Every structure is written in structure tokens, then in C-alpha cells.
Image (cartoon, grey):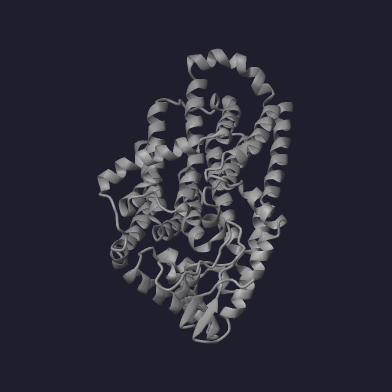
């Protein structure tokens, strides 16, 4: 009992420290500005606002743009709606919402799913909280591409936001299976959410579909009547996916991609590419997190009632699901995708490590060997509060040495450095001055790009005419009402 109370106090302290670590991450967001496709898609609503039109005209303009994009570029209809709503459209000072709208759903989705799993397994709440904090520390502080996740709306909402929604959907479906109350209403909400996810990126769609299929199979085997509701959710997801995949614009876009792979080679190669990530991302923080998970789980897995049979087979299945994330990108582009897509692989990597730890600690704890060594480990479990605190400290201290991106700092450190050095403030001032020039009327607008920009914030990304990146200039011209935007050198 004394150890349990100490563990609760440590969980509270760590939760407060975790929240404090996010302050610089959010603070630097107030200096951030849009980039590239933020202007491409944002121009739709910007023109409505500039014309002084209201909500009906805005809805009509967005719907027309979704139809146009569906025919000429991509089928992800729900994502295109989101793209047009980038916060900078409404105010230059609103783009900080990009970070809030990606970071907070990630925290919420992860917390909801862990809480639901904890309730189903009757896990101690403190254990769930500590696992959540460790998982989110790894996911946020060591995210491979910080800019494209938390500081670029177009990239972050397409992947991280949809990933978070998939966690919420899985939580909802599990609640349908375990709670009899409000099942019809919950099913309807899950169907709407599934349809929305089906209009997004293929990686999230595929993994969500696989997990729902496994859940449906488990319900059928156990003759649980909730399989009907889960089937309806799957139908909603598949319907939206079919609409998404059938878009003529997908073929137009595919024609611009020089390489692709056939389906079977893409599936097989995804196992190889997944192992490159699994092994390459593993470092001291991940090893310490596994030790923390094992410590917290040891007593629990001996009492939760699960048999933990076939851990190798189940571990292989978990790895196959992790690998499946990479198949759509390999099929379409013969690579694993851009940084914003790799980021959601990294979030799933934390879940993979947690799943493997649970399976193998459970198997060991309930085996003959586990029974024999339990007495030897009883001293550790009696002092689990102190050990958990030490492991948590060690995890944080090893973060700087284990970032997946060479030379990058943990997210909070990078944000704090940009604020303390004044780099974020200088970037904001330069960008604001450029915006003033862009708002001046005229057919041709000549502007420089920002000379100072933290690595994870957004430059304008201008290019000279004839270069591959010149489309950014054209997007800015369309957004601000010019015929042409020309990049010039920054004057001292």
C-alpha cells in the first residue's frame, strides 16, 4: 500500500513535469507562419473572406474545391476540407493553432486508448498513467520530423491528426464491445469518424482497417453480438476508402511519380523497411522505457487473467501490422514516404514496443520460470516507486543522444533554444515584414525569403522561375492576389 501511494505521487510529479516540458513547444508556435501548401489550399477560404462573403459561400467554395481536387489531384476528400481551413487564413496570429491541433489530439487519442485498454484489463490507473507519460515522451520529444508534424498544418493534420483520430476510433469500437449503454449512439459516432478517416491518408486507413478486421474476427469467434456494430463501422470506413481510391485525380497524380511498386513486392519490402526503422530507432530511451513497462507490468500480468500463449506468433502479428503502414507508400512511390508520414510510423513504434513488452513479460511471469524468479524480483517490485522514478529520470537524460534525426535535439530543447536565442522572434519579425509587402496591391510582387528560421519552423520556400519549387511562388501569388511573386535576395 505504501509503495502504491508513492507510485501515485511519482506519477503526479512526472505528469506535472511532462506538462511543463510542453510549454516551450507551444510557446514557440506563436511565432510560426504558414508554408507552401498552406497557401495553396488556404486560398479557397481566403478569397471568400476577402470578398466579405458568409458561411454559405464558404461552404460552397470548399465543396467546389474538393470536387476539383478529386478530379485533378487526389481523392482524400475529408483531408482536403481540412487543408482549406488552415488557421492562418483567419488571422496571421492564429497559425499557432497548428501545434495545438496536432499535439493535443495525439495526447488525447493515446490517453483514451490506453485508458480503455486499462479498464478492460483492470490495470491500475497509476500504471496506465506512467505508461502514457513514457510513451508520449518518446513520441513527442524524439519525433523524426518536428516541422512536418507539429509546426506545418498541411503536413501535420494529414498524418498526425488522422493517426490520433484512428486511436479515438479504436477506443470507441472497444467501448462498443465492452459497454452495453448507448451502443447505438456510439456506433453512429464511430461510423461518422470511420468515414472521415476513410477520406484521409492510406496508411492510417489500412492499419485501422486491419485492426478492425482482427477485432471483428475475435468477436465472431467469441460469439459477441457487438460484431454487427463493428461491421457497420468497417463498412463506413471501406465506403469512404472506395470513394477516396476511385478519384480520377489519383491517376493524374500517379503519372507525376517516376517510380512505384507492384502490390506483392510492396508488401514484402515493407517488412524489410519496417525492420530498418525498428532497429534504427532503438536506443537507450527505448530500452529504458521497456524496462519501465516491464517493472510496472510484472505483478499486474500475473493477476489479469490472460494466458499469454503463443507470444512469438502474436509478436509477429504485431510486427506485420506495423510493417503494413509502409505498404501504401511503397506501392505508390517505391519509398516509405516523407517525414510527416514517417512520424506516424514512429508513434506506432512506441505501441509496438509496448505490445511486445506486454506479451513477453506476461508469458514469462506466467511460466514456470516466472514463478521461480518472482520471489527474487519481489524486492524490486516492493520498491517499484523509487525504481520507476529513477528509470523515468534516466529516460529523459538519454533523450539528447538518441534522436532519430542526426543532429536534432529533443523537441522541448529545440523549442527552448529557438526562444532563448531570439531566433524565433527574428524569424517572426522578418516573416511579418514580408507579409506586409505581399499584401500591397500589384501584379508583380518581389520579396525575399526569411534569412533567419529555426530548423523546425516554416520559411516561405520561394524559388526562381523555372525551378521545381516555383509552384510555391504561384501559390503565394494566388493567395495574395498577384499575377507573379518573384524571389529577390535579402537586403542587409
Q: Nearer the viewer, residue 219 or 41?
A: 41
Image coordinates of residue 279 in percent, x first then y, are 46, 35
Q: Is residue 191 above or below residue 440?
A: above
Q: Nearer the viewer, residue 261 or 306?
A: 261
Rendered image quadrant of residue 312: top left
Q: Is residue 217 visible?
A: no
Is residue 101 shown left or right of residue 467? right
The quarter in which the C terminus is drawn is bottom right
The quarter in which the N terminus is drawn is top right
Q: Nearer the viewer, residue 150 or 470?
A: 470
Is residue 279 shown left or right of residue 146? left
Image coordinates of residue 483 in percent, x first then y, are 46, 83
Q: Nearer the viewer, residue 236 or 314?
A: 314
Q: Is residue 158 above or below residue 285?
A: below
Number of disc labels: 0
Seen at 56% across and 38% down, the residue is: 118
Q: Is residue 240 visible?
A: yes
Image coordinates of residue 46 in percent, x first then y, are 52, 78
Image coordinates of residue 403 in percent, x first then y, are 56, 42
Amino acid at each position: 500500500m505504501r509503495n502504491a501511494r508513492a507510485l501515485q505521487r511519482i506519477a503526479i510529479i512526472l505528469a506535472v513535469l511532462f506538462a511543463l516540458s510542453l510549454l516551450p513547444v507551444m510557446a514557440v508556435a506563436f511565432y510560426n507562419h504558414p508554408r507552401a501548401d498552406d497557401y495553396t489550399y488556404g486560398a479557397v477560404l481566403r478569397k471568400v473572406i476577402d470578398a466579405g462573403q458568409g458561411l454559405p459561400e464558404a461552404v460552397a467554395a470548399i465543396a467546389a474545391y474538393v470536387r476539383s481536387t478529386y478530379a485533378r489531384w487526389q481523392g482524400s476528400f475529408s483531408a482536403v476540407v481540412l487543408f482549406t481551413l488552415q488557421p492562418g487564413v483567419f488571422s496571421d496570429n492564429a497559425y499557432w493553432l497548428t501545434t495545438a491541433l496536432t499535439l493535443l489530439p495525439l495526447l488525447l487519442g493515446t490517453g483514451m486508448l490506453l485508458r480503455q485498454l486499462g479498464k478492460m484489463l483492470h490495470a491500475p490507473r497509476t500504471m496506465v498513467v506512467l505508461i502514457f507519460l513514457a510513451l508520449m515522451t518518446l513520441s513527442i520529444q524524439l519525433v523524426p520530423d518536428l516541422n512536418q508534424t507539429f509546426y506545418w498544418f498541411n503536413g501535420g493534420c494529414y498524418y498526425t491528426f488522422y493517426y490520433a483520430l484512428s486511436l479515438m476510433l479504436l477506443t470507441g469500437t472497444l467501448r462498443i464491445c465492452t459497454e452495453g449503454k448507448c451502443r447505438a449512439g456510439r456506433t453512429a459516432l464511430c461510423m461518422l469518424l470511420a468515414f472521415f478517416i476513410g477520406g484521409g491518408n492510406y496508411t492510417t486507413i489500412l492499419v485501422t482497417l486491419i485492426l478492425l478486421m482482427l477485432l471483428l474476427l475475435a468477436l465472431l469467434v467469441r460469439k459477441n453480438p457487438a460484431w454487427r456494430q463493428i461491421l457497420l463501422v468497417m463498412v463506413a470506413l471501406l465506403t469512404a476508402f472506395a470513394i477516396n481510391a476511385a478519384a480520377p485525380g489519383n491517376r493524374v497524380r500517379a503519372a507525376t511519380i517516376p517510380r512505384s511498386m507492384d502490390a506483392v513486392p510492396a508488401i514484402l519490402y515493407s517488412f524489410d523497411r519496417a525492420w530498418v526503422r525498428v532497429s534504427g530507432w532503438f536506443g537507450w530511451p527505448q530500452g529504458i522505457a521497456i524496462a519501465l513497462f516491464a517493472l510496472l507490468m510484472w505483478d499486474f500480468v500475473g493477476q489479469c487473467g490472460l494466458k499469454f500463449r503463443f507470444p512469438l506468433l502474436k509478436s509477429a502479428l504485431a510486427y506485420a501490422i506495423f510493417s503494413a503502414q509502409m505498404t501504401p507508400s511503397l506501392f505508390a512511390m517505391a519509398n516509405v514516404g516523407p517525414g510527416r508520414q514517417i512520424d506516424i510510423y514512429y508513434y506506432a513504434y512506441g505501441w509496438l514496443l509496448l505490445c511486445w513488452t506486454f506479451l513477453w513479460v506476461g508469458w514469462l511471469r506466467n511460466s514456470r520460470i516466472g514463478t521461480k524468479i518472482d520471489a527474487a524480483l519481489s524486492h524490486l517490485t516492493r520498491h517499484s516507486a523509487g525504481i520507476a522514478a529513477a528509470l523515468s529520470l534516466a529516460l529523459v537524460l538519454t533523450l539528447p543522444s538518441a534522436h532519430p534525426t542526426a543532429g536534432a535535439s529533443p523537441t522541448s530543447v529545440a523549442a527552448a533554444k529557438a526562444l532563448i536565442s531570439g531566433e524565433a522572434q527574428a524569424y517572426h519579425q522578418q516573416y511579418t515584414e514580408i507579409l506586409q509587402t505581399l499584401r500591397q496591391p500589384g501584379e508583380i510582387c518581389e520579396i525575399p525569403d526569411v534569412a533567419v528560421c529555426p530548423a523546425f519552423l516554416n520559411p516561405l520556400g520561394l524559388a526562381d522561375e523555372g525551378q521545381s519549387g516555383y509552384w510555391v511562388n504561384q501559390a503565394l501569388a494566388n493567395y495574395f492576389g498577384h499575377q507573379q511573386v518573384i524571389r529577390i535576395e535579402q537586403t542587409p
